[in-house]
Amino acid sequence: NLSQKLFQNVSEKSSKYPKPEVKFTYGTAGFRLKAELLPSVMYRMGLLAVLRSRACGSKTIGLMITASHNPVQDNGVKLIDPMGEMLEADWEKYATELANSDEVGKCLKDLTEQVKLKSAEWNVVGNVVVARDTRPSGSELAQAALDGAEAFGGKFNDLGILTTPQLHFIVRCINDPKYGTASEEGYYKKISSAFVKLTKSVALSPVNVDGANGVGAPKMSELAKHLKNVLPVSVFNDGSTGKLNENCGADFVKVGQRGPEGVEITVGGRYVSVDGDADRIVYFYHDNSGGFHLLDGDKISTLIASYLKEKLEESCLNLDHGLGVVQTAYANGSSTAYLEDILNVPVACVKTGVKHLHKKAHDFDIGVYFEANGHGTVLFSVEFKSKLEKAKQGPDLGPKKKAALEELESSMNIINETVGDAMSDMLIVEAILSKKEWDLPTWDKCYQDLPNRQRKVQVKDRTVIVTTDAETKTTSPQGLQGEIDTLVAKVKKGRSFVRPSGTEDVVRVYAEAETREDADSLALAVAGKVFDLAGGVGTRPT
Ligand code: G16
């Protein structure tokens, strides 16, 4: 029978992609490793994408090949569900099982039975679209994924080089054409025309973009062409000389709290850094004395939340679940206090990983979610959308209400609701700043970040660290949390937590305090305890 033949075919073709001696795990954002270890994973994710598509009644599934903020020699893969969201959590374990199996055909057959594909569904086509970032290993890995999709009888389309959020957008549009036109061009047109409408074509000063020497650079230039000179965009670190994510990009700027190489920073200029697949963004500027200032994901979420809240109030839309913000433990304590005490916005805290924030943001009618590292977006509920639509037709709209409704609608069309998106986030920030007539220092003054520091600790096995309470506390190894509590108690406004990274082989340490000195020494002391109690390797942190 057809299915038996397919599983046989899958097994035979898999010999082209032998599995190395590695234990693969679907981490914070899919599989991430040195590129040479990944061909077998890609082949298998091609298979899984076809299975997922069949299980979703033939809806198209996306497969993005990227290692985002990681170095150029790494690569990875993330699967995208029909509505453009991250792969459903239940399927992450199937992905891990299939990636590690010694008998691919049998494992796929077992998974097929587990996901209970009824025979009626079995014959539906599995549809997959694949894209990749600019890493040199990308095209070979994409071929492995396409081979997998083909071996399992799927229909597939190679979309070439795209940013991660562009692929999320396209997947959504294929499955839900109301959302937009399913192409790169359709993406630029939707977000840029909404931007031009919202800013009413007021000419803005140029924004300077650090493209991290990755896919964000050419795509930002492409976006600029659609902005009709309303917003001039000047791109540096465009990949013509430097290496991907090396001494540049959103992660380098956020973690190092300094500007990227590759540009002379001018006082009064607006600068942004994106990461290797352009799903994160941070802003920065230099003050008159050359001091560096970072406006990270927390600053972006507070800016967007305050603007949308104001427009919501002016529009008089009556919503059951209102507007809220979702953060992680990395959010600066000052940002949470500003949201709760000054803006009166409810704040939820969840585990690291956009997939967790995205899920929680659905609790609100307008759910603004951002990680401090600049990864985030806004979700608008079905109820919000239908009330907005109805209100626009209302008989006695005053000019203020009418304008607020239009602004809400344009904002929604600028924002990529499927996932965090550097380009669309930049446009919404630029639009809000222009409407408020704010420069970066004015925005920055909304609240002052508590000094903070992040460190990485190398350990033998990072899974010995187990966390709870949205990663704010550890339950293992024994004694570690007690040590952290003691260190934190000695410091004014101190806070610290540790967690195993889901994208790198390290334990991450975060610390904040009232002074820079205390934040730095708290981070160092906690890193030392992790090294001692969690099996540190190499030199103890100094
Ligand atoms: C990915 C995830 C983010 C996460 C980051 C770091 O970002 O999408 O949600 O914050 O990894 O995760 P971890 O601390 O577990 O290594 P990206 O931009 O690399 O895809």
Image: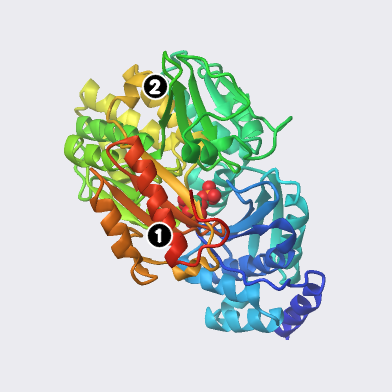
Question: Looking at numbered disc 2 in the image, what kind of residue is underneath it?
Answer: Leu
* Left/right of residue 536 with respect to residue 327 in the rendered view: right
Give the residue number, with chain letter if any, for mark 1: 529
Which quarter of the image is occupied by the N terminus? Answer: bottom right
Task: Reply above or below: 276 against 43.
Answer: above
SS for callout 2: helix
Q: Nearer the viewer, residue 147 or 290?
A: 290
Q: Earlier in the sequence, mark 2 or mark 1?
A: 2
User: 277 or 165, which lies in front?
Assistant: 277
- Disc sitting over residue 222 in the figure: none
**Percent of width and height locating residue 478:** 35, 72
Q: CA distance from mark 2 to mark 1?
A: 38 Å
> Do the numbered discs 2 and 1 sit on residues whose CB atoms are within 8 Å?
no
Q: Residue at x 56, y 74 (%)?
A: 94
Q: Position of residue 242 (x, y in %)?
A: 70, 33
Residue 43 sits in quarter: bottom right
Residue on which disc 2 sits: 440
Q: Position of residue 455 (x, y in %)?
A: 46, 48
Asked whether residue 393 appears in the rendered view, the answer is no
Residue at 53%, 78% in the rendered image: 115
Few, some or many residues within 10 Å of mark 1 (<14, 14–19, 20+): many
Q: Nearer the viewer, mark 2 or mark 1?
A: 1
The location of residue 312, given as percent across then percent down, is 24, 35
Is residue 163 in sight in this rendering?
yes
Disc 2: CA contacts within 10 A as few (<14), some (14-19) or many (>=20): many
Element at label 1: helix
Quarter of the image holding residue 337?
top left
Relative to 34, is 259 above or below?
A: above
